[in-house]
Image: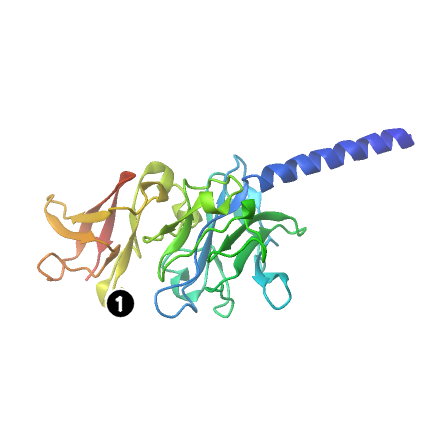
Amino acid sequence: MIKFRGFIGFIFLTTYHLLLATYCSGGVVINEFVYDADGTDSGYEWIELYNNLSNDVSITGWKIQKWSSSSQDFEDFIRISSGTYTIAAKSYFLLSQSVNFDKYSADFKYSDDDEMGNSSPQCIRLVDSFGNEMDRVAYEDTYATIVPGEGNTSAGEAASGSSLTRDPDGADTDDNAADFYENVFPTPRSSTYGSFREEGFCYAAPNPFIPAEDGTCKIIAPASCGALSATIEIYDLSGMLVKKLTGTNVWDGTNEECGKVATGNYFIIYRALKGVSKGKMTIIR
């Protein structure tokens, strides 16, 4: 009987470690994040998770931890608690501070006081409810001798307002430098917009867009399209070009002559070196 129990224990532990290895080698990962927003960081930072697995995963009690230079260790940063949270298979989960929470239809709001750092050394990691590391990303050209990123590399740094994004979406080769690139057109995705990348759609955030209240909106495109040589074209229902954006994905609701665009539905075409995506949006005056 003792041998049988030992064998069962061996099978249980082996299965557990196999499952753990599956998660760690590309299950739920930190997919994209903005740590240095335009202007003030507080309230504008966000972190996007992606589930590479073919099954849903409960992430209740999971944490985002960040490296502390003072303690020379990882410390709790964000705890996904105060509710029950699941990230669907092949989908997204967006953690956001207050300002963009509603704008991006985020799944979890965390305190504006909890900020990621934007000067080296920096590293964040995702751990499950048992404290097992699921993923880690070093950035800001952090040296591996200080805190190693995956593959003993760093994801580099992102300019103010840009994000660090996996390329392609969800890719995890355990090498931060190879997996991430700087995206000048950040693409925050929540569970609400989880299918947009696979279907090649782009969209406006917020949508509907009310210029008098929102000021501007952002055109969000699939990460698979990239941001190199990107242009955004906005058409009315008759097929007439209303606005062309180059070098920015922010639109204030005006046309090429700087006049106000009328209430109605509009088509969006996002073109970049890696691909094209299409979508639609509504403007309310």
Residue on which the image places disc 1:
213
Quadrant of the image for the N terminus?
top right
On the picture, is 192 further left or further right than 219?
A: right
Quadrant of the image for the C terminus?
bottom left
Q: How is the image coloured?
A: rainbow
Residue at (42% x, 67% y) in the render: 43
Eyeballing the image, is 120 above or below 26? below
Residue density around tag 1, few if under 14, some if 14–19, many if 20 or more, within 10 Å: few
Closer to us: 46 or 57: 46
Horizontal and vertical percent for residue 31?
46, 48
User: Is residue 78 visible to the viewer in this orientation of the structure?
Assistant: no
Q: Quadrant of residue 262?
A: bottom left
Q: How many marks?
A: 1
Closer to us: 62 or 132: 132
User: Is residue 226 visible to the viewer in this orientation of the structure?
Assistant: yes
Horizontal and vertical percent for residue 48?
46, 51
Residue at (39% x, 41% y) in the render: 195
**Dot 1: element:** helix
Residue at (24% x, 47% y) in the render: 230
Residue at (19% x, 53% y) in the render: 245
Horizontal and vertical percent for residue 111?
50, 67
Q: Disc 1 residue type?
A: Glu
On the picture, is 215 further left or further right than 92?
A: left
Horizontal and vertical percent for residue 95?
48, 56
